[in-house]
Amino acid sequence: MRVLVTGGTGFLGKRLSKIRPDWIYVSSSDYDLTRQKSCKRMYQDIKPDAVIHLAAKVGGIKENKENQADFYYQNNMINTNVIHEAYKFGVRRVLSALSTCTFPDVTMNYPFTEKDIFSGPPAVSNLSYGFSKRGLFVQSISYRDQYDLNYSCFCPSNIYGPDDNFDINSSHFVPALVRKLFLASDAEEVEFWGDGAPLRQQMYVDDLAKIIPILLEKHNSGIPLIVAPKENLSVKKMVDIGISVSGKKVSPKFNGKYKGQYRKDGCNKELLKLIGEFQFTTFEQGIRETYEWYEKKY
């Protein structure tokens, strides 16, 4: 089966290619998926039997908050073109990555389940990104229902690890943590967004890369399958673990800005029913491997 991976040179795509080098990986330098003609040419050139759709405009909380229009437009154009052109080209299998940002800012129960996806709006801090991913889910299940296609979606929690985006202005929390600690001197005060209280499920990227080929084979339903470890730590706890791993004698300072939603932890019961028991990498182990990788690279 010829499997096409969009977003193939992005963070997750790079790690997935180490596990499935036989798949075909494309990036925005190959095809501009915000443009219908370019997306159509991609399908004509590659002639895939299946698509794993990872391409997206992503960024940290500050970038999301300050560039809502860019996130909304680019992600909606990418998703609309990828799904519709797959249908037109006769591709019967598409597996698309959503995000737990797709889920409501607040739900009645935690961890939330797949049934909670429409129970409220996404968090204001990433409203555009959340709604664009929710739109991708609606489009996928609509084409699934109307055209009898095996189009399905999965919702990963926050991912981190080697090959992440470590740019201090646009990165997510964990790569920013790694970079700040790497650059810090002993006795320095290191500043972080928020107040340290929010809870997050952080998933080591290679865990997700191992799970995706299983989902391509087994996730054949219309539910927005949550892919996340059970471990759910506060930002403050993760900072403390990061400091311990780095060996630096620094003190953290939280500036109160861009706090984000308090919690967005999802239940992984449906995932484990589908793929069986899976040993997720603990945050302490994952950030240690990430920090050591960053030290060697930089």
Image (cartoon, rainbow, N blue to C red):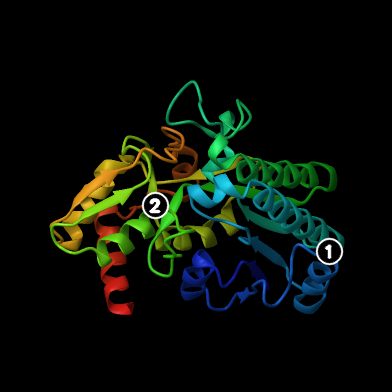
Q: Nearer the viewer, mark 1 or mark 2?
A: 2
Can you identify the residue that label 2 sits on?
A: 173
Q: Nearer the viewer, residue 160 or 174?
A: 174
Question: Between marks 1 and 2, how big is the CA–CA gap?
Answer: 33 Å
Q: Residue at x 58, y 30 (%)?
A: 115
Please name the amino acid that badge 1 sits on. Gln
Q: Nearer the viewer, residue 198 or 266?
A: 198
133 displayed left or right of 273 = right
Mark 1 and mark 2 lie on one chain; the one further toward the N terminus is 1
165 displayed left or right of 232 = right
Neighbour tally class for label 1: few under 14, some 14-19, many 20 plus, Cα within 10 Å: some
Name the mark on residue 36. 1
Look at the image and tell me whether residue 78 can be seen. yes
At mark 1, the secondary structure is helix
Asked if the residue at tag 2 contacts the one at tag 1, i.e. Cβ–Cβ closer than 8 Å, the answer is no
Quarter assignment of residue 178:
bottom left
Q: Position of residue 170 (x, y in %)?
A: 49, 58
Q: Residue at x 26, y 66 (%)?
A: 182
Q: Is residue 1 above or below residue 128?
A: below
Neighbour tally class for label 2: few under 14, some 14-19, many 20 plus, Cα within 10 Å: many
Q: Position of residue 146 (x, y in %)?
A: 84, 43
Please name the amino acid that badge 2 sits on. Phe
